């Protein structure tokens, strides 16, 4: 006679292990997500700090407040170019600034200040590439704009149109 064991409770099944490749992909995705969130948060904190420091030093006190309130990243970058960037960088990006000033942000006073800087550089420096075309285009934008901030640029229109 033979006795066979009787189990009252079934043995627990062994849980399946996650394959190594899947674990690597999950860990990599989590790392990239954390990096993206951390980078965006760090940029936001440093931008706010830069505006506060500018305000405390007294530099750009008139532009620090609107820069802090802009919720559009492209507008923030354009405003930085218009106020704080060197004239060389401003002139390299002049086509972009004037296009967005005409089409997207026609009433932004800070961008009009940048357009005034561009106009003054066009009048002063004869060695700029496509100087005549850029001067005529800026004159057209200033003449067709109804914005009150365009008044200083309208004062340069006659000089811009005389560029040959």
Image: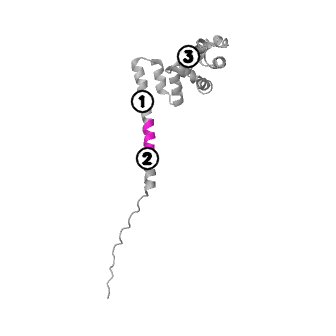
Residue at 41% x, 31% y: name it.
Answer: 45
Name the mark on residue 30. Answer: 2
Q: As displayed, is residue 89 above or below residue 124? A: below
Residue at 43% x, 35% y: name it.
Answer: 41
Mark sitting earlier along the chain (2/3): 2
Q: Is residue 72 visible?
A: no
Q: As displayed, is residue 159 above or below residue 81? A: above
Mark sitting earlier along the chain (2/1): 2
Query: Mark 2 packing: few (<14 Cα in 10 Å), some, or many (20+)?
Result: few
Mark sitting earlier along the chain (1/3): 1
What range is drawn magenta here?
A: 29-40
Q: Evaluate if marks 1 and 3 touch, with contact meaning CB atoms under 8 Å apart.
A: no
Query: Mark 3 packing: few (<14 Cα in 10 Å), some, or many (20+)?
Result: some
Name the mark on residue 117. Answer: 3
Q: As displayed, is residue 26 above or below residue 61? A: below
| Residue 74 in the figure: left or right of residue 58 | right
Quarter of the picture containing the N terminus is: bottom left
- Residue 159 in percent (x, y) is at 64, 11
Residue nearer the viewer, 25 or 127: 127
Residue at 55% x, 21% y: name it.
Answer: 90
Quarter of the picture containing the C terminus is: top right
- Residue 114 in percent (x, y) is at 55, 19
Q: CA distance from mark 2 to mark 3?
A: 46 Å
Q: CA distance from mark 2 to mark 1?
A: 24 Å
Residue receiving disc 1: 46
Extreme-bottom residue of the structure: 1
Query: Mark 1 packing: few (<14 Cα in 10 Å), some, or many (20+)?
Result: few
């Amino acid at each position: 006679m033979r006795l066979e064991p009787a189990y009252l409770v079934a043995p627990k099944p062994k849980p399946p292990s996650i394959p190594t490749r899947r674990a690597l992909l999950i860990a990599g995705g989590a790392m990239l997500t954390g990096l993206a969130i951390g980078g965006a948060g760090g940029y936001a904190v440093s931008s706010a700090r830069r505006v506060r420091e500018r305000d405390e030093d007294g530099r750009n006190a008139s532009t620090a407040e609107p820069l802090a309130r802009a919720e559009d990243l492209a507008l923030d970058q354009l405003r930085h170019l218009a106020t704080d960037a060197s004239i060389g960088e401003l002139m390299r990006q002049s086509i972009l600034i004037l296009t967005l000033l005409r089409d997207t942000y026609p009433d932004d006073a800070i961008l009009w200040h940048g357009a005034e800087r561009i106009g003054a550089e066009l009048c002063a420096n004869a060695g700029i590439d496509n100087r005549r075309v850029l001067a005529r285009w800026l004159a057209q934008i200033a003449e067709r704009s109804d914005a009150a901030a365009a008044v200083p640029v309208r004062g340069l229109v006659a000089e811009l149109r005389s560029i040959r």
